[in-house]
Structures are given as C-alpha cells and as structure tokens.
Image (spheres, rainbow, N blue to C red):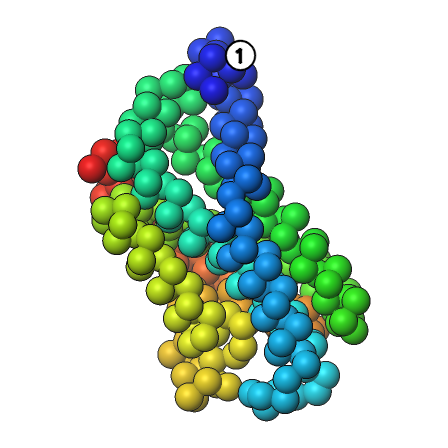
Amino acid sequence: MAADTALSPTQPQGRRVLAQARFEAAILARNGEQLLVSLVLPALAMVALIASSYPELPEPRVALVVPGVLALAVVSTAFTGQAIQTGFDRRYGVLRFLATTPVGTDGLLAGKAVAVAGVAAVQLLVLGALGLALGWRPDPLGLLTAPVTAVLGVWVFVALALLLAGLMRAEAVLAVANLVWVLLAGLGGLLLPGDTVAGLGPVVRWLPSGALGDAFRDGMTGAAVPLLQWAVLIVWGALLSLAVVRTFRWRD
C-alpha cells in the first residue's frame, strides 16, 4: 500500500484519501467476522422479528422492523467493525506506520469514514432488498431522508469507535465493542423503539442509537421528516469528534 502511486506526495489529498478508503473497504469486505456482524446477523434479526409475534408491534410489523435493522447494520459497520480493527491496528503499530505515509493522520481517518460509508451503502441496499422481498413498502419520502440519516449515523458511530479504540487496549476494545453492540441492539432503540423495551423511550430517544433508529423509522414510515433525530445525531457527532481529536492515541 505504501508503494501505491495513489498515495504519492505529488497526488492531491482527495485522491490519497480515496486510495486509503479503497484499502480500508477491501479489509472490511474480506473480514468474515465483520460480514457476520454487519450483514448476516441483521438479516437473521429481520426475518426473525417479522415472523415472530413478540414483542408486540403495530401492524404491519415489517414497517418498523426493517428500518430498525438498517440502523443496526450502520452501527455494526461504523462502530463495532471500526473499533475492533482500529484497536488492533494501533496495538500492532499499523496506525503509526500509516500515519507516516503521504495520506497523513487526517487523511487516514477520513479514508476510514469514506470506506465505512461505502460499505454501509452496500449493506443498506442488500438489507433493503431483503425487506422488500418480505413485504416492506417504505414511504417514498423515507427513501430521500434515509441517506442523510445513514451519513449522520456513520459519522457518530465512527467517532465513537475511534474514541474507544484510541483509549483502550485492543483486547478490551474487542470485548467492549461487542458488548455495546448487543446492548444497543436490545435496549438502545436500534432494532425496536425504546418504549417497546421496558419503557425506556424517554431516555433512549436522546441516545445516538435511539436517535438513529427513530430517524430511520420515522422517515421510512412517513411519520415525519426526522429533524429532531438529525439534530441529536449532529450534537453527538460533534461531541464525539471533539473527544477523538483530544484523546486519540496513535500507539499503545
């Protein structure tokens, strides 16, 4: 990669970032564990929740289930995958090496974000197609709001992933990232609205996971343009990004 002409110091920074993004996306695509978490498990969750009668949801169930699964897929790639990969890259000195290449530290982080956005777009298309096959019929307006929601979700959860990976040892990142994924999926308002799980709606809606899930659900069902949820995600994204800038360590 270091020998890639796209990373030559004479090339514009934008081309270097895109080259780094292609490299990062290829790593994500070849990672079997990541594909399991980001695509297979969300697909299974979609089928199971649509076929099940629990928890009790308004009919048609598919209208709420599919947007929740899309939110879960974004978090799987933007947070879980990036936190674990970045944590181990930092441990083995890969981050320190990449930071010395022409792409630089800012370009490296931008490349990761672009790669995640690209992979997430493919995920959403695949899972959306599965949802359509299962009877999902999204509101046309929701198809316009979904890309905005997805981009904001990628920003917030990549920032959270980098914050975690930059502060903790790789083994701890592995354990914590997977635990957080399970908690957010079950209780954080991703798969299902917060008020369907132990009445947590008043709290969950202000969490980044709850805001992301609600933004997909409100937009895709035509309930409303999710302006409030977007605002919550923007605030979380700004706070987490600032924390990353101040605390991220490039080596153990």
Report the residue marked by disc 1.
5
- Residue 235 in the image: x percent, y percent? 40, 58
Q: Nearer the viewer, residue 190 or 181?
A: 181
Task: Say left or right for 86 vs 44.
Answer: left
CA neighbours of label 1 inside 10 A, class few (<14), some (14 to 19), many (20+) = few
Task: Say left or right for 130 vs 170.
Answer: right
Toward the front, the furthest residue is: 32
Q: Nearer the viewer, residue 142 or 118?
A: 118
Q: In terms of secondary structure, where does tag 1 sit?
A: helix
Q: Nearer the viewer, residue 146 or 125?
A: 125
Toward the left, the furthest residue is: 252
Q: Is residue 237 above or below residue 18?
A: below
- Residue 70 in the image: x percent, y percent? 60, 62
- Residue 87 in the image: x percent, y percent? 32, 43
Q: Is residue 235 above or below residue 5?
A: below
Q: Residue at x 63, y 52 (%)?
A: 123
Task: Say left or right for 212 vs 97.
Answer: right
Q: Quadrant of the C terminus?
A: top left
Q: Residue at x 59, y 56 (%)?
A: 39
The picture quadrant where one finds residue 203 is bottom left
